[in-house]
Image (tube, rainbow, N blue to C red):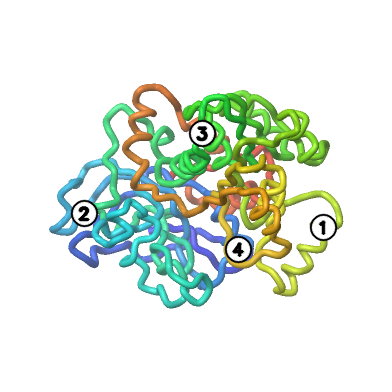
């Protein structure tokens, strides 16, 4: 079969590889109908996530048709359309029973690797390094889905792929980011980063009742989408405006009630501080550029919440702990517990509350994946979200 494989920094290729097989009784094999390039995949593409090996199949947002199941998979059958969550969860450990599925204690066979960097290991993740389990990803013609009896969500008839594909990751992730803000009527929420996750954080904050939602980015096409499709009420171009001062003006000097960092490890900012952090990254003195997180902490109102859903890989410099502690801020974060949100968000899609397909700007064949990565990382042709069709 054909699959998108990582071969080094900014080097992905569509290779011919062996088709996956059932390995365990709770496995399913899926013929992929749609998959997508995620902003998190760009961290792999840019060589920022350790323990990748040449030839690894990437991709963690995918859906398709079940073509084979292990004997213990009873929730789906051959012929069903399913969407698959990016974290792999067993459904029976303490974390899964607490619905903290991205912290599953049983699905990362390389937990020892993650423990060296993080202290404890999160769940295994499709197509996202050997530190996260070494599982083959879904940017391919077929994929093996471990614990399919827990993770696979059957897609009802009459719903297009593009409406449900993002239940695999970015829609639940954006929703969880907004949910962690404990939004109350009248709240103002600021969202750093208007990529696909940021768009869903904005849309989710609107669904949860925020009165004012401020989108922060530098790309006009992203800010337009945030205002016209996601539901933002205000937009800040951080290359043209001072973000903290503008937020003060928009909130009567108080700051937003909650701030969402939907950027993560590869944040950008104008000025010398950006060059300083890039140099520290280059000489391995830090792994993450946390401009958005620093700014969100400093801008948030006293007693507010900072919600972090942008992916971080390791260590950051100049963390404003004094601001966080002295101003009674609450910091909430985590890889999304996707399984918890899939069915409730599917219901919102079905009742017309949201059509997640609004984020799709490019649809390509699987063979065009390398071009899709290059276009996405370079922000060419107003590229915000690429869907691949095997």
Is disc 2 in contact with disc 1, using a CB cutoff of under 8 Å?
no
The residue pinned by badge 1 equals 273
Rendering coords of residue 388 (x, y %)? 48, 45
Q: Nearer the viewer, residue 19 or 91?
A: 91
The residue pinned by badge 3 equals 183
The residue most toward the right is: 272
Q: Residue at x 78, y 30 (%)?
A: 249
Q: Residue at x 66, y 56 (%)?
A: 266
Of marks 4 and 1, the one in the foreground:
1
Q: Secondary structure at mark 3?
A: loop
Rendering coords of residue 95 (x, y %)? 33, 59
Mark 4 vs 3, N-terminal side: 4
Q: Secondary structure at mark 1?
A: helix
Of marks 4 and 3, the one in the foreground:
3
Mark 1 vs 3, N-terminal side: 3
Q: Is residue 14 visible?
A: yes
Mark 4 Cα shell of 10 Å, populated few (<14), some (14-19), many (≥20):
some
Q: Nearer the viewer, residue 385 or 99?
A: 99
Rendered image: mark on residue 11: 4
Q: Residue at x 47, y 29 (%)?
A: 208
In the rendered structure, the answer to whether residue 219 lies left or right of residue 231 reads right
């Amino acid at each position: 079969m054909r699959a998108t494989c990582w071969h080094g920094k900014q080097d992905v290729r569509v290779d011919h590889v062996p088709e996956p097989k059932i390995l365990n009784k709770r496995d399913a094999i899926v013929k992929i109908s749609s998959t997508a390039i995620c902003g998190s995949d760009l961290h792999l593409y840019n060589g920022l996530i350790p323990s990748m090996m040449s030839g690894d199949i990437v991709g963690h947002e995918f859906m398709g048709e079940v073509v084979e199941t292990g004997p213990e998979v009873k929730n789906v059958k051959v012929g069903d359309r399913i969407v698959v969550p990016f974290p792999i969860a067993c459904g029976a450990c303490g974390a899964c029973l607490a619905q903290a599925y991205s912290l599953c204690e049983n699905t990362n066979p390389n937990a020892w690797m993650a423990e060296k960097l993080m202290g404890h290991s999160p769940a295994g993740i499709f197509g996202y390094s050997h530190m996260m389990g070494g599982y083959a990803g879904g940017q391919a013609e077929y994929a093996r889905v471990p614990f399919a009896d827990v993770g696979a969500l059957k897609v009802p008839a009459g719903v297009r792929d593009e409406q449900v594909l993002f239940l695999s990751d970015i829609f639940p992730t954006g929703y969880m980011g907004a949910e962690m803000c404990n939004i109350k009527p009248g709240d103002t929420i600021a969202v750093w980063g208007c990529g696909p996750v940021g768009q869903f954080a904005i849309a989710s904050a609107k669904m949860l009742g925020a009165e004012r939602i401020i989108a922060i980015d530098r790309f006009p096409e992203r800010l337009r989408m945030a205002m016209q499709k996601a539901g933002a009420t205000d937009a800040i171009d951080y290359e043209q405006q001072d973000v903290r001062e503008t937020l003060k003006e928009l909130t009567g000097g108080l700051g937003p009630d909650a701030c969402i960092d939907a950027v993560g490890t590869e944040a950008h900012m104008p000025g010398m501080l950006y060059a300083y952090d890039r140099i520290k990254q280059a000489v391995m003195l830090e792994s993450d550029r946390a401009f958005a997180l620093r700014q969100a902490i400093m801008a948030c109102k006293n007693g507010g919440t900072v919600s972090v859903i942008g992916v971080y890989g390791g260590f950051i410099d100049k963390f404003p702990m004094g601001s966080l502690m002295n101003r009674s801020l609450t910091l909430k974060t985590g890889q999304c517990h996707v399984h918890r949100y899939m069915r409730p968000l599917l219901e919102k899609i079905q009742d017309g509350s949201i059509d997640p397909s609004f984020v799709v700007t490019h649809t390509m064949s699987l063979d065009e994946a390398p071009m899709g990565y290059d276009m996405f990382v370079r922000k060419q042709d107003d590229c915000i979200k690429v869907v691949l069709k095997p």
